[in-house]
Amino acid sequence: KRGMTWTRRRQSLIMVCDKTYQPQNKKSTVQNLVFDCICGREIGTDFGSLPPDLLVKIDPMLVGLALENGVSNAIKHTPPNKGPPRIICELANNNGTSTLNLIIQNKATPGAPFISEARERELFQCGTHGRGIEVSSDGIGLGHAVMAATTLGGRVSLRQLGDTISYTL
């Protein structure tokens, strides 16, 4: 299932790059959106006070692409003895508009460069961050996540506080 979903997401990304993608907003529960992305992998979830049946109108293809990138990076870059990453889901109220924040947190790999604001900008540039990291990377995923989020009017951020890295969509 994950392979076909990945293929459809990449096809959508090609259309985003080509500027021909038309967002397809659909109703989904937040839990379904998250569990479709996790797909049996070891990652914790924290839905806080969100009702399990909370419906959001969202483009599952592009949100899934950006979320999948965060999940796979968190799993790939979490040291084995630091526990699994987790997804925190929360609603923020911004001037009467509700915003869904999906936050993926993991522990930093010892010895990896600290993620400063300058490092975040570098990481979000396609093809630039595979250097100096022992884990294999093509260096394009975070740039694609930013493109997907921007197409939907959202954003992606990557922050580090101590040894905790937070990828927020």
Image (cartoon, helix red, strand yellow):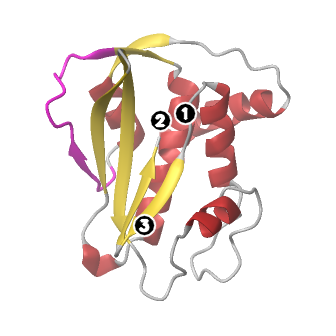
**Residue 169 percent across, percent down from the top left:** 47, 40
Q: Is residue 130 left or right of residue 85?
A: right
Q: Nearer the viewer, residue 117 or 10?
A: 117
**Which amino acid type is marked by label 2?**
Lys
Q: State the separation of the CA atoms marked 1 and 3.
A: 30 Å
Residues rendered magenta in the picture: 41-55
What crowding class fits label 3: few (fewer than 14 Cα within 10 Å), some (14-19), or many (20 or more)?
some
Identify the image quadrant of residue 121. bottom right
Q: Closer to the camera: disc 2 or disc 1?
A: 1
Residue 86, numbered circle: none
Q: Is residue 123 magenta?
A: no
**Residue 39 percent across, percent down from the top left:** 36, 42
User: SS of the residue at dot 1?
Assistant: helix
Looking at the image, residue 151 lies above or below residue 166? above
Write down the residue under mark 3: 160
**Residue 97 percent across, percent down from the top left:** 39, 16
Tell me which numbered mark, 1 or 3, is placed earlier along the sequence. 1
Q: Is residue 53 magenta?
A: yes
Residue 1, numbered circle: 2
Q: Is residue 46 left or right of residue 105?
A: left
Identify the residue at horizontal 63%, vertical 53% (top origin). Answer: 142
What crowding class fits label 2: few (fewer than 14 Cα within 10 Å), some (14-19), or many (20 or more)?
few
Write down the residue under mark 1: 5
Q: Closer to the camera: disc 1 or disc 3?
A: 3
